Amino acid sequence: MHIQAHVSLKEDTTFHVPATARYLVEIDKQSDIRALRSDPVLAVLPWHVLGAGSNVLLTHDIDGVVLRNRYQQIRLVKEDETSVWLSVGGGLNWDTFVRHTVEQGLWGLENLAAIPGTVGAAPVQNIGAYGTEVQDAITRVQALHLLTGERHEFRNAECEFGYRTSVFKGRLKGQYIIHRVTFRLRKLAHGHPNLMYDSVRERLVGKDEKQLTPLDIYEAVSAIRAERLPDPKQEGNAGSFFKNPEVDADYFHQLQQKWPDIPHHQLVDGSYKIPAAWLIEACGWKGRCLSGTDACVSSRHALVLINRGQATGAQILQLAEAIQTDVNHTFGIHLEPEVIIL
Ligand code: EPU
């Protein structure tokens, strides 16, 4: 366990906005939580969990304890003819883990290539991209209760996964730190590529589908992301800032009458998902900044809010609110942030 006091968090979130934490505590084992709870100073402060800070916007200093899981081991839990089960430390970098799996020829996570963040953060918001959500591969999540330090094991169904959400972001928000996550992955001969997205298929054109490996998909998705999304190392950002909204069929048809080009995707329940990026761009926000600040909408992708250098978290939040107001005014749709705002 490692404890630091009065720490800058500027380099600890991918938005790179200024903020400090009264204490930053890095844990790696289960007993660390109990030890911290017995400390009279730390125990009475509010605790917040931070992974790689790639899906969080800090709008003020944290007058409390910021906790980070450093446990990074990968363990083989079991194996049968078709699959392997890996239990992975929540502190491991997500892409390092995905790269490891595709290099072993394992199917399951290849469409989730190049997503910033940690293994422990992946189930919290059920990361998803190019037709895969991490819930498809997770069998169990081992989490430590922040008050008692007890270890709780959540089976997949108990994680209450949804679109960019889970029980850890919803009902049990702020109560646990994810210690380990168990994944079931398919062996090379027992899985197949998920080519549901045109952009992935187009990248692989000319290749024999039967010969494709998890590494081929990983590389295709990484290349698409590098082209489309701004790199947080160059322009602070947390990927998509809002969720793509869903509207019922009646409302969608009203919108379509007024905006015949509105992109959409029909869901199994008959409702429609509309790309938030399109709504934001249609309101004229793409590439624009909050006046006099470095809080901007990326000119590469309208769903990504960026810090061009000196923006504060409060300014980025103000920008997000201005966008919400405009989209609501124009389309009657409320955009819900995907990013966690602290
Ligand atoms: N579009 C615009 N303007 C833009 C960008 C996109 O109008 O500047 C429209 C286009 O019509 C495009 C559509 O939006 O076809 C969808 O764009 P894209 O394929 O980039 O996907 P997205 O819906 O914006 C979602 C996820 C991403 C994920 C991609 C690919 C959410 C909130 N975001 O983005 O996830 O990588 O699909 O599967 O569901 C993240 O969560 O941080 C993230 C990056």
Image (cartoon, helix red, strand yellow):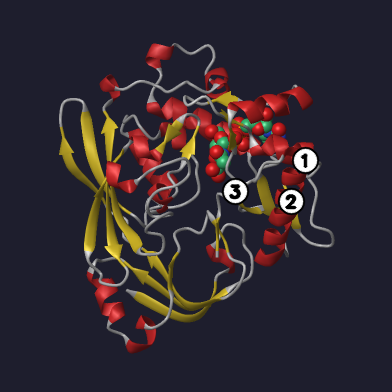
In the rendered view, does 184 fall on the left or right side of 284?
left
Specify the amino acid type for callout 2: Thr
In the rendered image of this protein, does residue 279 appear above or below residue 7?
above
Of callouts 1 and 2, which one flags the residue occurring earlier in the amino acid sequence?
2
Q: CA distance from mark 1 to mark 3?
A: 16 Å
Mark 1 element type: helix
Q: Position of residue 333 (x, y in %)?
A: 67, 41
In the rendered image of this protein, does residue 121 appear above or below residue 285?
below
The residue at which mark 3 appears reads as 336
For the point 42% across and 54% down, which residue is it? 170
Q: CA distance from mark 1 to mark 2?
A: 9 Å
Question: Considering depth in this image, is 193 or 268 the residue closer to the camera?
Answer: 268
Mark 3 element type: loop
The residue at which mark 1 appears reads as 330
The residue at which mark 2 appears reads as 325
Specify the amino acid type for callout 3: Glu
Q: Nearer the viewer, mark 1 or mark 3?
A: 1
For the point 84% across and 62% down, which residue is it? 292
In the rendered view, does 14 fall on the left or right side of 47?
right
Question: Considering depth in this image, is 43 or 116 the residue closer to the camera?
Answer: 43
Q: Position of residue 113 (x, y in %)?
A: 47, 37
The quadrant holding residue 79 is: top left
Mark 2 element type: helix
